[in-house]
Image (cartoon, coloured by chain):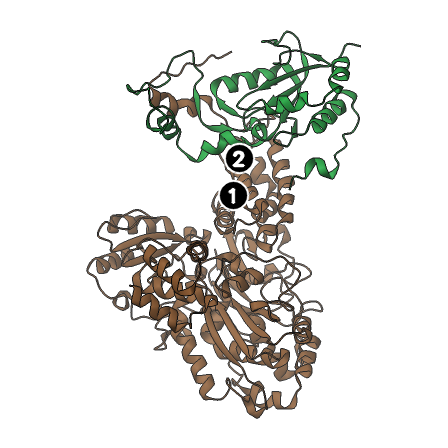
Chain colours: A green, B brown
Amino acid sequence: MSKPVVATTSLAGCFGCHMSLLDIDERILTLIELVEFNKSPVDDIKTFTKAVDIGLIEGGVCNSENVEVLKSFRKNCKILVSVGECAIMGGLPALRNGIPVEECLHEAYIGGPTVQLNKDGIMPNDDELPMLLDKVYPCHEIVKIDYFLPGCPPRADLIWDALVALVTGDPMKLPYEVVKFD
Amino acid sequence: MENTVKQIVEKYNSNRNRLMDMLIDIQEGEGYISRDAIATLSQLLDMSQADVEQTLSFYHFFSTKPRGKYAVYLNNSPVAYMFGREAIKEAFEKSAGVRFGEVSSDGKIGLFDTACIGMNDQEPAAIINNMVFTRLTPYRVRELVKMMKEDKPIEELRKESFGDGKNYLPSLRSMVSSNIRRKGMILSDDYHFGTVLREKLPTLSPEGVIGEIKHSAIRGRGGAGFPTGLKWEFCRRAKGDKHYVVCNADEGEPGTFKDRVILTEKPELVFEGMALAGYAIGGEEGILYIRYEYRYMKDYLEEVLHKMRKEGLLGTNISGIEGFNFDIRIQFGAGAYVCGEESALLESLEGKRGEPRDKPPFPVEKGYLGYPTIINNVETFATAVRIVQNGGEWFTQFGTDDSTGTKILSISGDCMFPGVYEVNWGFNVEDMLDMVGAYDVQAVQVGGPSGTLIGPDEFHRTLGYSDLSTGGSMIIFGQQRNLLRDVVVNFMEFFIDESCGSCSTCRNMTQVMNNKLKKILAGKGVPNDLKDLQEWGRVLNASRCGLGQTAANPIISSLKNFRHLYETLLQKDKDFDEGFDLEKSVQASCSYVGRVPVFNHH
């Protein structure tokens, strides 16, 4: 039987969730035994080359490229998992959601106290750039998400247990400490 | 200004627990509470400004900005809309030249929305400078605005045709109608006030009073239905230097107005009941906590208390009983539904934000200022008097086995005779609809937004604690009403506004669920959404107080009893649609940076 295929991506995230995945320490060797990676920063495969079983999404959706990547994940993965607060709720980037996007752009490129060199008030408007969304969306407001792994980042153990459960089909252990944060 | 604040603080003996009164006095004097007033107040009370501001910012009727010489608060409950609120709103905006939420540039007229003001049987209604204007029409609105523009005193805006019942009394002079349609033991005129205090109490010990109340099996009339006798007994036994009697007249549940009517027509009965309770639990101080929407009753209620003191029904050694001392003061709220929750009410009484407390300890052990306190509904106190007058045994002949006595219902909506009905428990909904002249009924909201929405196949159900429990609000919706759009969304937004924000469940889930409901109404719903709503509703049970625990009820109960209304709106062929629209969501940023959006449609 061929190994289950896993793909990962970071949208509007900080890669902290990916770091947490690497935090499984020596179990990474077992992981490589268990699964095969496809499109992922882990192996630097840029585009999907085959059907994928499990897609792990880090980060929320803040621009048109995020939307495109997320939709391609939905199309190519049997199971999609939102990993971490940003994917689940928008996280820190969503702090801008209460502020009109025009104001955010103005603050970032023209009015902000650290803006010094942009005397001509040039805005990023090249067609090559992703287009900014009006707010940061959680992944499940764009595509159907099957599972959610909470945490900022989710603990390595939680990611590990979830992956193993998905791959083996065994029920997942969810002890109190893993889901209770205060 | 500094002097005014100083006088106000002195009036309340610099007592921080009276912060609500101080803020109300400043607000009524100046029309708002300025930064300077906050600074002076905090200095005089030796509190931080943040502490003053956190109380102030909690209540809807307090404002740090001027609200206009005439501040208009127009009710936005579903029944107000059913009776033409849109046209009234438009008439106000057009003739005053200002939009809702704003104050006219000359500072004269401010227009604001407000949650149910307890006038559901005479909508559309508004409060203008504490005076209630009922049954508004666009013509009347234009007339009112014209007079406001001419700076007429508020009394002149009032019509000389006062409401029925006692509303004509000089200290009330109110346009509000009591609309009593059916009387029972509480609303009847055959009780002579003071009889129980004068004739019964000298023959009964406090334990004897509690015994009669327990025997009567009366349960709390506010809606929760806790056995009153037990509450009084717990409080009597609780150790404390003082014991307090608090009457809950916050009546914020949209569609409820019977406490307003009881306090208008039978305030003596309520106050007598409070004194009786004081005797029973060994308390000497009573507080009537009443919602600010009923501020127009202030002078009237003070006058009644004054008269009772003169007649020896309040004061020291009442009815010649050595050591039976009791007096009552009135505390106004300032616009917060959650203060109807008893522990939030206590916080508010102490001059703080009305956030519910953790329980236990319950108020009977640690209540007002940490002393043992009973908190009962207006109707409960009034009923207690008749129980002690006639005995607990007499009382049990009314109603049913588990719901003894009578219940005063506030009935409004699509019916011929909206108003207040005192009925024996055990009435069924069908009987009620016949009684009020309601035909072709689509649904009845029993117990307000936190209660249940039922349809015709449940109209055989009876009113009582074991079946359809209610604090008294019954809103009737005819076939012509759009239940989801006009009722459920309105109620959800009510809870969103009124959540104190303490528990994340109530603060967030109400929003999330309402967004989903609106998505369904916009035609973007999928079958799974109904499952989500049902499951998410359960999350709210983890909230600290009754508001949070019932805040999903508008959706949950309509989903249960009117599922077809939801189902017809769903896109059956899809299993996912969150209504995300890429083109729409990049519009603002693209036009701001000056680029034409390009989409790759794969």
Determine if marks 2 and 1 fall on one subunit. yes
Amino acid type shown at disc 1: Leu
Give the CA distance from mark 2 to mark 1: 10 Å
Residue B426 position, x and y percent, is 65, 66
Quarter of the image with the N terminus of chain B is bottom left
Query: Tag count in the figure?
Result: 2
Q: Say which element carries label 1.
A: helix
Q: Residue B64 in the image: state x and y as whole percent.
A: 35, 54
The residue beneath circle 1 is: B484
Tell which subunit mark 2 falls on: B
**Disc 2 marks which amino acid?**
Ile
- The residue singled out by tag 2 in the image is B520
Q: Position of residue B401 (x, y in %)?
A: 71, 69
From the viewer's perspective, is residue A92 above or below residue B436? above
Bin the neighbour count of mark 1 within 10 Å (Cα to Cα): few under 14, some 14-19, many 20 and up: many
- Residue B402 lies, with reference to residue B569, above or below; the image says below
In the rendered image, the residue lying farthest to the bottom is B320
Q: Position of residue B449 (x, y in %)?
A: 54, 53
Whether A146 is drawn above or below B287: the answer is: above
